[in-house]
Amino acid sequence: MPTATSDIVAEGKLIGETSYQDRAQKYTELEIDGIKIDYYDAKNHVIHEVKKSDKVEYAHSAQVKYYMYILQKHGISGVSALLEYPKMRQRQIIEWKDGDRNEVETWIR
């Protein structure tokens, strides 16, 4: 992994760890089909994704929708996601909607 990429990953991990210190004790890290979900609340079926960005981007919701798609392929349905932006003190809930499967499969193709 190039140094710049590893620095970005390290910065994101640090933000997640310092902003949500008790999260690792409450939620599970999930790795499946080449994706790695840092925080997954298996009880409530919620993906928690912490973004270091200071702006909301379409790519962020697309990323968690892809995660939801992979989980559905493995029989885990009813999953939602919570995008968290600690720098902005904002949260965005992402729900799976009709048509999302087709959209994600189009991205894959």
Image (cartoon, helix red, strand yellow):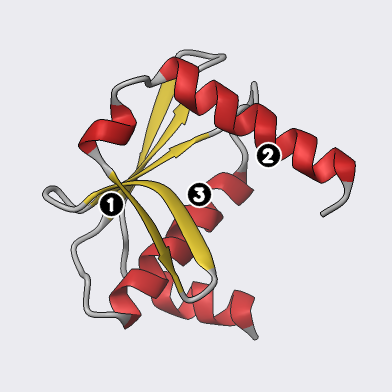
Q: Which residue is mark 1?
A: 80
How many angstroms separate mark 1 from mark 3 (CA)?
A: 11 Å
Mark 2 element type: helix
In screen coordinates, is 75 left or right of 58? left
Q: So how many labels did they put on this image?
A: 3
- Residue designated by label 2: 9
Marks 3/2: CA–CA distance: 18 Å
Q: Amino acid at mark 3?
A: Ser
> Where does residue 91 sit, x and y in percent of width and height?
40, 26
Kindly indicate whether the residue at mark 2 contacts the one at mark 3 (C-beta within 8 angstroms).
Answer: no
Q: Looking at numbered disc 2 in the image, what kind of residue is underneath it?
A: Val
Mark 1 against mark 2, which lies toward the viewer? 2
Relative to residue 40, is residue 66 depicted above or below?
Answer: below
Secondary structure at badge 1 equals strand
Which marked residue is nearer to the observer: mark 3 or mark 2? Answer: 2
Mark toward the start of the polypeptide (1 vs 2): 2
At x 38%, y 21%, the residue is 20
Instruction: Depth check: give the residue in front, 101 or 69.
Output: 69
Q: In the picture, residue 9 is in which quadrant?
A: top right
Q: Amino acid at mark 1?
A: Ser
